[in-house]
Image (cartoon, rainbow, N blue to C red):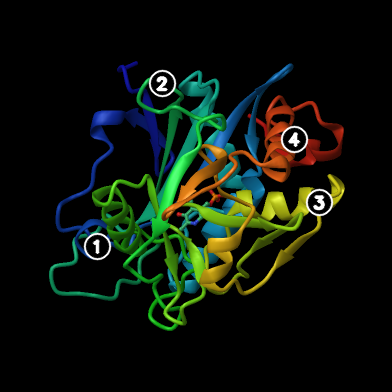
């Protein structure tokens, strides 16, 4: 086994270094690849994927939205993830799945072949620190707007959509902030580069509705867990000024789970505030895979 392990590509485990595509492939030269990233967690009886069913549903949805065809069924992809995780002896880490046209596309813009599939198992390491929920971040409004849903579907997790994300993070970093938060072209809150955004005002948790943001599985999980934890929550249009008066703000995504924001533009916020603290405590317990109320969110690998 090479240091970086084995990658599952179209049914075969191959060395990481060999998992490549031609420079003129459609996936690379047109940016059309779609992908998923989800967590692997250590439980008492082994390792578990976090909501793999939901992540695969989102991958299938990305393909459908972009009129592409996956080559594998849900059951086949689940078995392939298991095979990859086991071959790489992964503990806490991430699974990254890429579905892409490796076919060269020098002239043709539209291809009709089924997508190739690659699955990576990436263990937590010095370079990939996960669950750093105790380290708050700073955030600002991005000068870039979230792509309009009538340009490309924002619900598709497609590589080309991440130019929008790249520019947002770059702009924020240039201005000394950790992350940027995009408004939609209508001026109302959308999301961060690779994270959903939540605010808390007077004890109520709020996040923008789908249709303008990615269907984040962390977002979905927080919205499902909040009522169980006694936290009122709303999916609603959020005006930019609400970010300037929020009691708490945090982002949600697979890598860190819940990331409190301690500075937004020139405001200092309590990070984590009481509602964020409650959610962080819940997640810390959840990822040990021993909360019976949410065991169905984990699939054994
Ligand atoms: C644009 C965007 N929003 C939100 C998220 C969070 O999604 P998830 O919870 O599925 O990681 C991501 C993840 O990469 C993202 O790219």
Q: Quadrant of the N terminus?
A: top left
Instruction: Give percent across and percent down for residue 123.
Output: 45, 24
Label 2: state its secondary structure. loop
Q: Residue at x 72, y 41 (%)?
A: 274
Mark identifier at residue 26: 1
- Left or right: 222, with 133 as reference point: right
Pointer 4 local density, CA inside 10 Å: few below 14, some 14–19, many at least 20:
some
Q: In this view, does 23 lie above or below 282?
A: below
Q: Is residue 91 above or below residue 198?
A: above
- Left or right: 60, with 123 as reference point: right
The numbered mark, 1 or 3, whose residue comes first in the sequence reads 1
Label 1: state its secondary structure. helix
The numbered mark, 1 or 4, whose residue comes first in the sequence reads 1
Q: Mark 3 points at which residue?
A: 231
| CA distance for labels 4 and 3 | 12 Å
Q: Residue 95 or 125: which is nearer the viewer?
A: 125
Q: Are marks 4 and 2 in contact (CB under 8 Å)?
A: no
Q: Residue at x 42, y 55 (%)?
A: 265
Q: Mark 2 points at which residue?
A: 125
Q: Are marks 4 and 3 in contact (CB under 8 Å)?
A: no
Q: Which of marks 1 and 4 is in front?
A: 4
Q: Mark 4 points at which residue?
A: 282
Q: Do the residues labelled 2 and 1 touch (CB within 8 Å)?
A: no
The numbered mark, 2 or 1, whose residue comes first in the sequence reads 1
- Left or right: 210, with 298 as reference point: left
Pointer 1 local density, CA inside 10 Å: few below 14, some 14–19, many at least 20:
many
Q: Which residue is drawn at 73% across and 65% down?
A: 234
Label 3: state its secondary structure. loop
Instruction: Give percent across and percent down for residue 56.
Output: 58, 52
Q: In which quarter of the image is the C terminus?
A: top right
| CA distance for labels 3 and 2 | 34 Å
């Amino acid at each position: 086994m090479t240091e970086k392990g084995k990658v599952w590509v179209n049914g075969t485990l191959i060395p990481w270094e060999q998992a490549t595509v031609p420079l003129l492939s459609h996936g690379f030269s047109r940016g059309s690849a779609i992908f998923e990233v989800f967590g692997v967690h250590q439980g008492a009886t082994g390792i578990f994927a976090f909501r793999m069913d939901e992540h695969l549903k989102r991958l299938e949805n990305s393909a459908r939205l972009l009129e592409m065809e996956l080559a594998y069924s849900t059951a086949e992809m689940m078995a392939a993830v298991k095979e990859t995780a086991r071959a790489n002896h992964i503990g806490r880490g991430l699974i990254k799945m890429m579905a892409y046209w490796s076919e060269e596309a020098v002239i043709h813009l539209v291809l009709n072949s089924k997508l190739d599939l690659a699955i990576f198992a990436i263990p937590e390491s010095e370079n990939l620190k996960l669950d750093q929920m105790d380290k708050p971040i700073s955030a600002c409004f991005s000068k870039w707007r979230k792509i309009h849903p009538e340009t490309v579907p924002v619900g598709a997790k497609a590589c080309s959509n991440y130019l929008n994300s790249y520019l947002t993070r770059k702009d924020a970093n240039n201005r000394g902030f950790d992350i940027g938060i995009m408004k939609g072209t209508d001026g109302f809150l959308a999301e961060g580069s690779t994270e959903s955004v939540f605010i808390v005002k007077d004890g109520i948790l709020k996040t923008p509705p789908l249709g303008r943001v990615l269907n984040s599985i962390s977002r979905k999980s927080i919205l499902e867990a909040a009522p169980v934890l006694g936290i009122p929550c709303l999916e609603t249009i959020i005006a930019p000024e609400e970010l300037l008066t929020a009691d708490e703000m945090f982002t949600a995504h697979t890598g860190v789970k819940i990331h409190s924001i301690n500075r937004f533009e020139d405001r200092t916020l309590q990070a984590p505030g009481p509602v964020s603290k409650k959610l962080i405590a819940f997640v810390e317990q959840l990822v040990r895979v021993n909360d019976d109320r949410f065991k169905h969110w984990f699939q054994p690998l």
